[in-house]
Amino acid sequence: QVQLVESGGGLVQAGGSLRLSCAASGSIFSINTMGWYRQAPGKQRELVATITSGANINYADSVKGRFSISRDNAKNTVYLQMNSLKPEDTAVYYCNTVLTTTSRSTLRYWGQGTQVTVSS
């Protein structure tokens, strides 16, 4: 089994910063893509940023220049540094990973979600 444990959400004023972390553990052979998605109330879940094992990065247009994704392969951990936060960034942020398990199955996993609230 694989577990994703997220941390770092909270309440911040507009213009502030937060850093999210997500650590994967369990029966992991290799990790391909790690990333973050978010879901605001009444809206569909949307991609925020992803990073591949080869460090190819993709950002949603709405966060380019403000958010930065990185990963520590030795720790199976992905980070999301969020700067210049706006009220519209308020959402539940979900960690996501596509990995190969020790039984050689390639699967997608989701974290439990962490709330980010930006006050105006």
Image: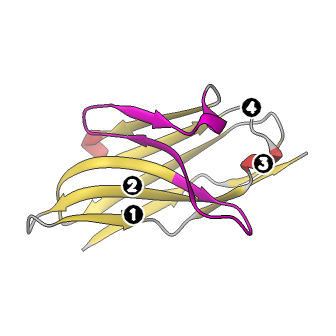
Whether label 1 touches label 2, CB < 8 Å: yes
| Secondary structure of residue under mark 4 | loop
Determine the image quadrant of residue 53: top left
| Secondary structure of residue under mark 1 | strand
For the N terminus, give its image quadrant.
bottom left
Residue 11 appears in the picture as rendered: yes
Task: State the image coordinates of residue 9 (x, y, percent, origin top left).
Answer: 64, 54
- Give amino acid for label 1: Leu
Residue lying furthest left: 103
Give residue 23's mark: 2
Badge 4: how crowded within 10 Å, few (<14), some, or many (20+)?
some
Give residue 4's mark: 1
Work out whether mark 1 precedes mark 4 in sequence or the reverse, and give the earlier one. 1
Q: Nearer the viewer, mark 4 or mark 3?
A: 3
Work out whether mark 4 precedes mark 2 in sequence or the reverse, and give the earlier one. 2
Task: State the image coordinates of residue 93 (x, y, percent, origin top left).
Answer: 59, 57
Q: Which residue is mark 3?
A: 88
Whether label 3 touches label 2, CB < 8 Å: no
| Secondary structure of residue under mark 2 | strand
Which residues fall within the magenta stretch?
Answer: 37-64
